[in-house]
Image: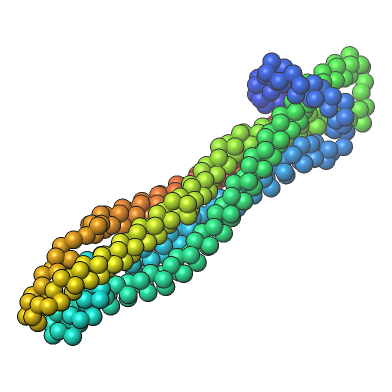
Amino acid sequence: MDNLPVLALSNQKNDLLYNKLAEKSPEKMQAARDMVPTLNFSKTHSVLAFGASSQKGLVDFTDSVLTNIRSGDAGPTGQLMANLKGKILDLDVRGLPQSTGGKLSAVAANIPVIGGWLSAKVDAARAFIRRYEVLKIQIDDITRKLEAEKTNQIEHLNRLDTLYERNEEYFDALEVTIAAGELKMVEMEGQFEQQRQAFAAQSAVDAKELQALKDFGDAIQSLDRRLYNLKLARVSAITSGPTIRIAQEGSKAIVEMIQDSILMMIPEWKKQLVIAISLFDQKRAMAMVHETRDMTNNLMMSTADMLGQTQATVKKAQGEGFVKVETLQKMTDKLVQTIDQGIQMDAQNKRKRAEGIQKLAEAEEKLKESLKAANESVIA
């Protein structure tokens, strides 16, 4: 009969997923076979609902991934690190005087010129210690904020791990669903052709029977289109895994930098400052020892001899030292360089994540165009 409907499907039958699953994943193949008897596409809308739950879960999952990429931005952390750098720069160990006096300084303080010079040295040391105490409170506050940001980034990492596992589950469910749909489509194609040949052998077929056969063929074509969309979703699930890992790299880098700052850089900086101040106090104590000896040995000397001896002692103390200020300066410069490097890496990682988001958006547009083209095609 010339008026019998003809079934025409796309070329995706040449790359059926269930053939691959039969080789690499027998358990998925068995799950697909178990699903086939539960599939019923007799209703017009039934094909549209096929696999919708898995696809919706994938869409929700992708939105969550993009949200976590944006939430993983290192902006707050970068600002905190910049503030920390400023505080370290604000307190330079070069501000410590290189010499100081003890009891003899009190005597020399009454001598014009020399007394003013020694008093200035002592006042500078005290001012440095006061500034250190104030900045220590501010740095401790920044440290607490960095700890909170570290906890926040660890939560991002844990959330992304969960999302990665969910993506694996979605991928497995999609593969089983697609394979079951393909098996069902092959079954329906056989039924369609069998019914068509039966009608062709009859001398007369009424319009109701022809319409039912056509509806059955339309359902097969709808299933073919639906399977194509599900295969696109499967590819999206494959690409989502690396996307999550990229997002995690940003959070891991932030956690590492914060941890290094809290456990290594800040304690080391404070330790060196404490050492510098301790050495300054040692120099002052040693000056007292020398001064006591000088006062005992020169008690009977004239005022002129005592003044000359005092000046010689002070000058000698100026040339002595237990620690090089240059060493502390280099250490401070190295700490600043480390922080600058971390800030530059933050900026680079931020640009990379921005590029990642742009590429995801481009991929989504390509997917939309592909789906739109598929919907506009007419299968005879």
Looking at the picture, tell me which residue is in the foreground, 278 or 191: 278
In percent of width and height, residue 276 lies at 32, 61
Q: Quadrant of residue 331?
A: bottom left
Where residue 224 sits: x, y (%)?
A: 73, 30
With 105 as the anchor, is 165 left or right in this view?
Answer: right
> In the picture, residue 285 is in which quadrant?
bottom left
Q: Residue furthest top?
A: 201
Tell me if 179 is positioned left or right of 103 in this view: right
* Residue at point 67%, 35% (across, down): 168
**Residue under the point 76% across and 30% down:** 177
Using the image, determine if residue 198 lies above or below residue 157: above
Q: Nearer the viewer, residue 364 or 286?
A: 286
Query: Does residue 43 appear to the left or right of 245 in the view shown?
Result: right
Whole-percent x, y for residue 192 in the image: 83, 22
Q: Is residue 279 visible?
A: yes
Does the image show residue 227? no
Q: Quadrant of the N terminus?
A: top right
Find residue 133 and report its horizontal and vertical position in percent: 41, 71
